[in-house]
Amino acid sequence: MNVQFLSNEKGEKTAAVIPIEYWNKIKQQLEIEVPDFWGDLPEHVKDGIQRSQKQFLAGETKSNDEVMEKYKKYL
């Protein structure tokens, strides 16, 4: 398989480009093998997910470093 990689300015791989026929096979497998579990989640979990999505869209996010700094005393 011919795979190409994209990298950032630091030379770190950030994406992979694969032939479309392989992508279509992957998509087909994911559609078959990944069940829709949303209906099985408790309402309080759905509410939390929806609340966090709204926070993300509003730009109310923190970096991993910020969170780790705040909670490192508990680790």
Image: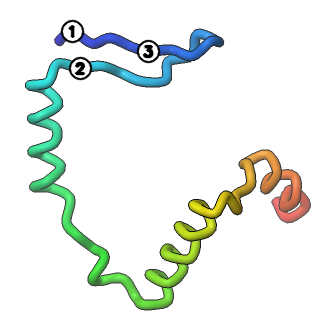
Q: Residue at x 17, y 12 (%)?
A: 1
User: Residue 18: horizontal and vertical position, in percent?
Assistant: 23, 20
Which residue is painted at 62% across and 12% down in the image?
9
> Please, which residue is most extreme toward the bottom here?
43
List x then y, in percent, for residue 34. Answer: 20, 59
Q: Residue at x 27, y 73 (%)?
A: 37
Specify few, some or many for label 3: CA neighbours under 10 Å numbering under 14, 14-19, or 20 or more.
Answer: few
In space, the residues marked 2 and 1 are separated at their CA atoms by 7 Å
Residue at which label 3 appears: 6
User: Which one is earlier in the sequence, the residue at label 2 or at label 1?
Assistant: 1
The reply, left or right, for residue 13 in relation to residue 23 is right
Give the residue number, with chain letter if any, for mark 1. Answer: 2
Residue nearest the viewer, comparing 54 with 21:
54
For disc 2, the marked residue is 18
The amino acid type found where label 1 is placed reads Asn
Helix, strand or loop status at disc 1 = loop
Q: Are marks 2 and 1 in contact (CB under 8 Å)?
A: yes
